[in-house]
Image: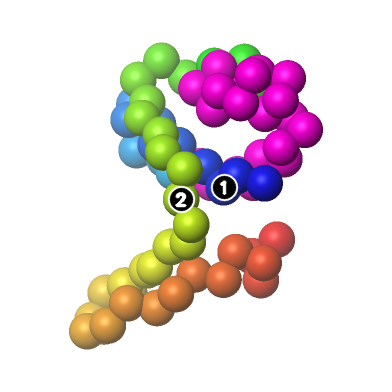
Amino acid sequence: MTKIAIINHDEHRLYIEDVSDEDLAKYNGEEENYIKDNYNLENYSWDYITGGVYMAEGEEEFTDIDFKKIA
């Protein structure tokens, strides 16, 4: 499994997705090809990630994002 983060620069929107190894195998392991086939985006960037943190307004420290709790 690979967790990818995609930023849609036109809408300033972040997408985070867990992509299975089986799904990536259909694209020869190429995340970029997977994104092009599954997202209708023109102006974007992406990278694989291992986790995330968030800092709310007024806070002084980052909080880890628990992606399993979001689902």
As drawn, 18 above or below 39: below
Q: Are marks 1 and 2 in contact (CB under 8 Å)?
A: yes
Q: Give me the residue at 32% from left, 77% from top.
A: 62
User: Is residue 18 a member of the stretch shown in magenta?
Assistant: yes
Task: Choose the circle earlier in sequence order: 1 or 2.
Answer: 1
In the picture, the quarter occupied by the C terminus is bottom right
Q: Position of residue 61 (x, y in %)?
A: 27, 83
Determine the image quadrant of residue 37. top right
The magenta stretch spans which residues?
15-35
Query: How many numbered markers are drawn?
Result: 2
Q: How is the image coloured?
A: rainbow
Compared across the picture, whether 64 is left or right of 62 comes to right
Which SS class for mark 2?
strand
- The circle drawn on residue 69 is none
Nearer to me, 67 or 3: 3
Q: Which residue is mark 2?
A: 49
- The circle drawn on residue 3 is 1
What amino acid type should be assigned to the residue bearing mark 2? Ile
What amino acid type should be assigned to the residue bearing mark 1? Lys
Q: Give me the residue at 37% from left, 26% from top.
A: 44
- Classed neighbour count for the residue bearing mark 2: other residues with Cα under 10 Å, few (<14), some (14–19), many (≥20): few
Q: What is the C-alpha distance between the residues marked 1 and 2?
A: 6 Å
Which SS class for mark 1?
strand
Compared across the picture, whether 59 is left or right of 46 comes to left
Q: Position of residue 21 (x, y in %)?
A: 71, 37
Q: Position of residue 1 (x, y in %)?
A: 67, 46
Q: Position of residue 42 (x, y in %)?
A: 41, 15
